Image: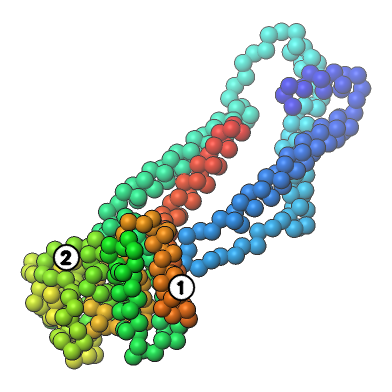
Amino acid sequence: GTEREKEIALRLALGAQRGALVRKLLTETKILALLGGAPGLAAARWLLSLLTRYQPPLPVPITRDLGLDMTDHLNTYGISCLAGLLFGLVPALRSTRPDVAPTLKEGMVPTRHRGFGVQNGLVAFQMALSVVLLMGGGLFVRSLAAARNADLGFSTRNAGIVWVDLALSGVPAAEQLAVRDELTRRARALPGIDKATSASHIPFLFHASGGFYSIPGADPPARGSGHNVQREEVDPEFFATMGIPVVTGRSFTIDDRPDTRAVAIVNETAAKRFWPGESPVGRQFSPLGSERTVHIVGVARDTKIERLREPAKPLFYFPITQSPDFDLVLVARGRPAAEEITVMLKRMIREVNPDLMILDARTMAENIGVILFPARMAAVLLGAFGALSLILA
């Protein structure tokens, strides 16, 4: 509109009607808007085809219906026309203002510098917005790098994970422990596998279960009569396989059987919260409403459980032989690639019992990727929008 002011003024001086010129300019802007909407639809189709093929790192597959239908085409056409009217009307009215003579005379003298008007303000705003978006994307990239280097409390090196639900698979409760032992034994015998373990939960795969406990000597909870603490049932090789050091006391052994005294290992946060300034090894607690006494035999290092930025939480570990659970998570590490280890575990489970329901199978890196997914997507989206905004500016 600014560049064509002299042309419009000359048309007005020659007798053109202002309404006709406004309609002409609006027609041009609408054509430009429609020419922008057409490749926009083509780009949308291409991006949606990429998006539908991408499978986010979630425990269940997700099917997305993201196709473009007639409503989307009509919406694009309507938005394009509206954009042409909205962004073409003000320049058209400004260019066809009736003060023709001053505009024509401006071409005969050097153009004076105009002040900081609306046009310059819009350009400055667009530049500022693009910088803000790029800085936001950069900050998310920095946060993503920090999250990748965060101390999770366990080893993230080459490992495969398979999650089986024994109850949904139809395995009777009395046989679940035997099936678990068989699968764990076979996992350790796979070629190239150095360590393997079974547990009811592992960090980040899904939420750990909790329980209420009566802890002698600990301050009573603010609500209720028992302390709510998260728990995991693990086998004797769990801490060595996961790379979680037992800092005080001992780990579980094959001697921790159902007919021996009940034992548990607590994490460092639980030791500090319930037995501050003391060693919890040798202390006792009981599940709320139960007469069973559990003896603490060790203290394990803290780990992240559900989120990267979560504060440390109390956690009790129980030997899976004394506290069976219908959820079975197999973790194996060795010389093969993590993807190959996962395939080997799945194949082994099918050979033992093809009816066992595998809820999830992934590598340790993919398991960590679930937690990093929001930060990664934010970094990609903000960076892409910031780059696009900067190019347009």
Could you say which disc has been placed on residue 246 in the image?
Answer: 2
**Foreground of the two, 180 or 366:** 180
Would you say residue 212 is visible in this rendering?
no
Q: In terms of image quadrants, where is residue 247?
A: bottom left
**Foreground of the two, 192 or 29:** 192
Which residue is rendered at x = 38% and y = 66% of the image? 161
Vertical order, 331 against 138 (above or below): below
Q: Point out residue 363 in the picture as x, y percentages from the top left corner.
A: 40, 60
Q: Are marks 1 and 2 in contact (CB under 8 Å)?
A: no
For the residue marked with disc 2, what is the amino acid? Answer: Val
Q: Point out residue 198 in the picture as x, y percentages from the top left corner.
A: 31, 73
Where disc 2 sits, the SS reads strand
Q: Point out residue 138 in the picture as x, y percentages from the top left corner.
A: 43, 40
Left or right: residue 267 versus residue 373 is: left
Which residue is rendered at x = 25% and y = 74% of the image? 235
Vertical order, 131 against 271 (above or below): above
Residue at image mark 1: 359
Quarter of the rendering occupied by the N terminus: top right
**Foreground of the two, 383 or 88:** 383
